[in-house]
Amino acid sequence: MHVGSQDPTWVAKINEGFGRFIPENLMYDDIADDPCVITSKLKDFYLNDRNVSNETAQEYARMIDDRLMTHCIAVAAEEYAKHSDVFLFNFTKFRSGSTPSN
């Protein structure tokens, strides 16, 4: 996976404004007591405190996906579970010879 292939300045902009960009895009800027602390922890957890680059593109995508997709599905499942049985599954496919990173 390559990041910023359409606009080479995109990666630089993301890294320069990571502390402003991520809280807004992951939708915790208005609800977190200290968005900077959360941003730092997210960067450490997903990117091992590295900048966004072609080498960290998968991890960056996972960070975005976990918030925008996985979190929303979990919230919806909790709401449905108030009215009916819900079975929530998370499937991960690994390539031959690969191992889970988390």
Image (tube, rainbow, N blue to C red):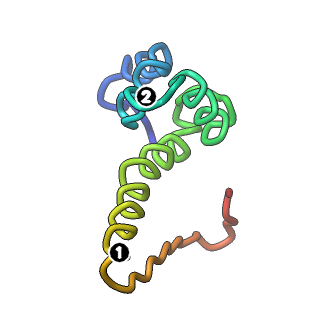
Count of labels shown? 2
Is 36 on the left-hand or right-hand side of 7? right
Q: What residue did someone put label 2 on? A: 23
SS at mark 1? loop
Is 57 on the left-hand or right-hand side of 84? right
Three-letter code, disc 2: Pro
Quadrant position of residue 71: bottom left
SS at mark 2? helix
Viewer-nearest residue: 13 or 23: 23
Q: What residue did someone put label 1 on? A: 82
What is the spatial separation of the Cα atoms under label 2 and label 1, in whole angstroms?
A: 30 Å
For label 1, the crowd category at 10 Å Cα-Cα, with few meaning under 14, some 14 to 19 and many 20 or more, is: few
Of tags 2 and 1, the one toward the viewer is 1
Is 39 on the left-hand or right-hand side of 69? right
Residue 97 position, x and y percent, is: 68, 70
Q: Quadrant of the C terminus?
A: bottom right
Q: Does the residue at mark 2 contact the one at mark 1 (Cβ under 8 Å)?
A: no
Viewer-nearest residue: 82 or 17: 82
The single residue placed furthest to the front in the displayed view is 82
Q: What residue appears at the point 43 percent right and 28 percent down from the top-left corner?
A: 23
Residue 33 position, x and y percent, is: 51, 26
Residue 30 position, x and y percent, is: 37, 27
Residue 87 position, x and y percent, is: 43, 82
Three-letter code, disc 1: Lys
